[in-house]
Image (cartoon, rainbow, N blue to C red):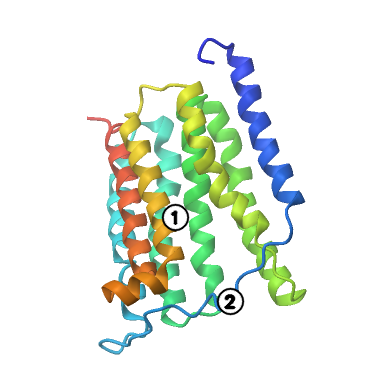
Amino acid sequence: MLNLKRSQKIAILFGISMLGVIGICFLPRIAQPIDYHAFADSRTIWGIPFFWDVVSNLPFLVIGLMGLMQVRHIKTDYRLFFGILFFGIFLTGIGSAYYHWMPNNTRLIWDRLPMTVVFMSFFSLLLAVHISLVAGKRFLIPLLVLGAASIGWWWFSEEIQHNGDLRLYVLVQFLPMLLLPLLVILFPSRVFATRHLIWILGWYVLAKVFETEDDVLYTFLGFSGHALKHLAASVAVWGMWHMQQEVRVH
């Protein structure tokens, strides 16, 4: 596969992306669970409701600020991607804390929207590094718009049509992570060490596992799976900060 022509590799990547898009269109509507906002740990501590689900977002704020403070030292080619990425991470910390303080659909918009900025800017960065800088810049804005549209469609279908559909949001969240290994294999790059991408993907998967086992982990550990999800995701984001350090201008 590595001996394929560049055009063939791009065709493979594009083809798999299109399969993902077509596949999600043919899936049945993905509804948000009725009990989505019923998190396992609803304890109020120091006057903060859902205390651990709220404060476990603090690492996103710290890492986001750390990344933004370093953006000026990044090589010009990648400065835009990292600037948007860490701004999205910082906003994720604010939006997620805001949502978990009083979980409802309206607040959930501000939890999910910044996350799409992180997913899409990170994927654009990978395109820039592994395929070409032109490709990364060309797809950055369309991908960010697609991310925002996925939240707009969910809210419209949920609140206006009363027939919520998360398919587009699922595509935005999972397709970049599914394509990540393929990008590394087809288009090796010396800009970032592969270990960082493995780190990010591994902790991301673990975060999703914690999220699905919210009640179970709270029962056995006294600490909710959702709070652990935030912490695991922040460890994944820490890998993005290390990636940034590799392209600093000294």
Who's the residue at 66% across and 23% down the image?
11
Q: How many marks?
A: 2
131 vs 45, left or right, is: right
Give 21 or 243, whichever is nearer the viewer. Answer: 21
**In the picture, which quadrant includes the N terminus?**
top right
> Residue 208, percent across and down?
44, 57
Whether residue 149 is visible to the viewer of this picture, yes or no, is: no
Who's the residue at 76% across and 50% down the image?
26
Where is mark 2, residue-wise?
105
> Residue 229, percent across and down?
37, 62
6 vs 247, left or right, is: right
Secondary element at tag 2:
helix
Who's the residue at 62% across and 62% down the image?
151
Contact? badges 2 and 1 (CB < 8 Å): no
At label 2, which amino acid type do we have? Answer: Asn
> Residue 81, percent across and down?
45, 41
Secondary element at tag 1:
helix
At label 1, which amino acid type do we have? Answer: Gly
> Residue 236, percent across and down?
34, 49
Q: Could you tell which of marks 2 and 1 lies nearer the N-terminus?
A: 1
96, above or below 5, in the image: below
12, above or below 64, in the image: above
Who's the residue at 54% across and 36% down the image?
179
Mark 1 is surrounded, within 10 Å at the Cα level, by few (under 14), some (14 to 19) or many (20 or more) other residues, namely many
Where is mark 1, residue-wise?
88
Mark 2 is surrounded, within 10 Å at the Cα level, by few (under 14), some (14 to 19) or many (20 or more) other residues, namely some
